[in-house]
Image: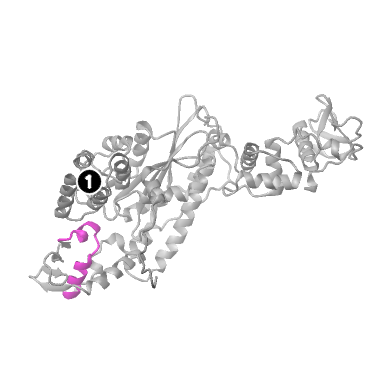
Amino acid sequence: MSSIDIAVGQRYESKDDLERRLKLLTVRHQFDFDVETLTPTSYVVKCWVDGCLRRVRASTQGESPTFNVCIYDSKHTCSCTERSNRSRQATPDILGELYKNFLGDVGPAVRPMSARVAITKQSGIKMDYWKSHRTLKFAREIDEGTLECGFESLPSYLYMIGRANPSIVTRLQIDELGRFMYVFLAFGASVNGFPFMRKVIVVDGTFINSKYKWTLLTELAQDGNFQIFSIAFAVVDTENDDSWYWFFTQLKLLIPDDEGLAIISDMHNSIGKAIRNVYPLVARGICPHHLYKNILGRYKGKDAFRLVKKAARCFRMSDFTAIFEEIEAINPALHGYLQRADVRLWTRVHFPDERYNLMTTNIAESMNRALSNARGLNIVRILESIRVMMTRWFAERREDARSQPTTLTRGVEKLLHGRVTAARDVTVQRIDDHHTEVKYGSSSESLNVVNLVEQKCTCRRFEREKLPCVHAIAAAEYNNVCCISMCSPYYNSAYLVSAYAESVMPADSTQPVPEIVANQPCLPPSIRQQPGRPKKNRMKSALEIALQNKRPRKEHTCSRCR
């Protein structure tokens, strides 16, 4: 903090720089000043207490715009009790600079109350919550840049990141006035790695914590090791028909429409319209969790709610039919709602395409959580946070994939280990060259027939997940068939290595940006900010509140021995 002090001979680029240094000095030493002389060539300030001789005089020399300190009387001749009674210079922007440069961290974990305590201890200035909130906001803008600066530098950033990653796909959409509308980003490493993924895409949108009320759209897949694989991102104004149609239009240039492709999302109507218009051949599914939230808010009955969850995850048509009839008997209104919601969208057994184990949009929620700290930054910092995360993920997972000694991925090996253990408890009987009978004990209800040639089982788990179920593993061991050959190639370690073969490179800021790119207009969108502090947490649904308030089941114990 000693560098804040002023000395004779110091030179400042402008009067504003000198005035800012004086304000920092007065806040640091707990006094105030009045401007005595202010002309284009001279600037004189003195202590605000009458009779005090503390004074600073600065002026220009010749035609230079810089201000040089000519006179500096640093000694106060007033009482400290008088000069500390006024602190007009302690504005949030000055306090924010003081806090950022000398006092503390400005990371996302820091709260306004922490900034208030640090400034009060150091400078003796008392602040209410809102002043500390604005102080921390200014401190973060010094470190991260303002929201408006992010729009100005967006074209240059997209150019630099595209130059470092030649196969990247970026799109910037602005309106006729040069104001920002949409931006799309898909790294070439992700696009080239998607052919080694199962053809199931999860899309979702989440809000961004800023006054512009943007929405971050994500498109994800899941690799053979059950890890999140990011494909594309977009920042749009809001989730509506136009934004989702634009997003899927850009996505179609990378991933063409195909009957073998499936897209999982929430129940947003705009997503359904965009998929029907842009991807007419794709099978669309909805996350049952969003269906559960609607059911919990409209219908009552724990038994019916439990049956809906069970029906969504059924593998066999007979099991689904029995559960659905039971729902109709308990709650006919709920049964009608589920039919109107289209069972082909939210059930596994009726889904027209391959869905594997991806029933929900949980991977999208996990991605939103991973980017939660970046969602309050300007748009360039948001995209750069995504880039940093992608670079780290690809580097770590490439190394991990190369180190896996087994033919199948580590996640699949862990899953099959439990099934191999369970397969030892079943009874196996060969039927013919292709079919094998597998059952638990002597019960005929647990009997399943496995066809190893067609890779099918009457439980339908083998067919849906493309991984051998317990019955298939038992039949394969009985017939001396390798279980690895019955797994889909998407679960092989070689596919995992190929998926993360390329790298995501950072932007090279040392290379110059062409003037036509740097001068490209990209103005912030026109908005009207709502009063009060912006909300950073979304409103929780009734289902989430109910799960939070759910008490654990009481453990019954003996009253004597406990």
Residue at the image point whose x is 62% and y is 47% from the top: 106
Q: Residue 224 vs residue 379: left or right?
A: left
Q: Residue 117 vs residue 15: left or right?
A: left
Give coordinates of residue 342: x percent, y percent. Answer: 21, 41
Is residue 221 placed above or below 34 in the rendered structure? below
Q: Amino acid at mark 1?
A: Glu
As rendered, which of 421 and 155 lies closer to the eye? 421
Q: Main secondary structure of the magenta part?
A: helix
Q: Residues within 10 Å of mark 1 (few under 14, many from 20)?
A: few
As rendered, which of 165 and 119 lies closer to the eye? 119
The residue stretch that appears in magenta: 458-478
* Residue 402 among magenta residues: no
Is residue 397 placed above or below 418 in the rendered structure? above
As rendered, which of 217 and 166 lies closer to the eye? 217
Give the quadrant of residue 464: bottom left
Give coordinates of residue 130: x percent, y percent. Answer: 62, 37
**SS for tag 1?**
loop
Q: Residue 451 vs residue 255: left or right?
A: left
The answer to whether any part of residue 163 appears in the image is: no
Residue at the image point whose x is 29% and y is 42% from the top: 295
Give coordinates of residue 259: x percent, y percent. Answer: 22, 46
Find disc 1 in the rendering and name its residue: 259
| Residue that extends furthest to the front in the rendered view of this protein | 560
As rendered, which of 494 and 216 lies closer to the eye? 216
Give the quadrant of residue 465: bottom left
Is residue 195 placed above or below 160 in the rendered structure? below
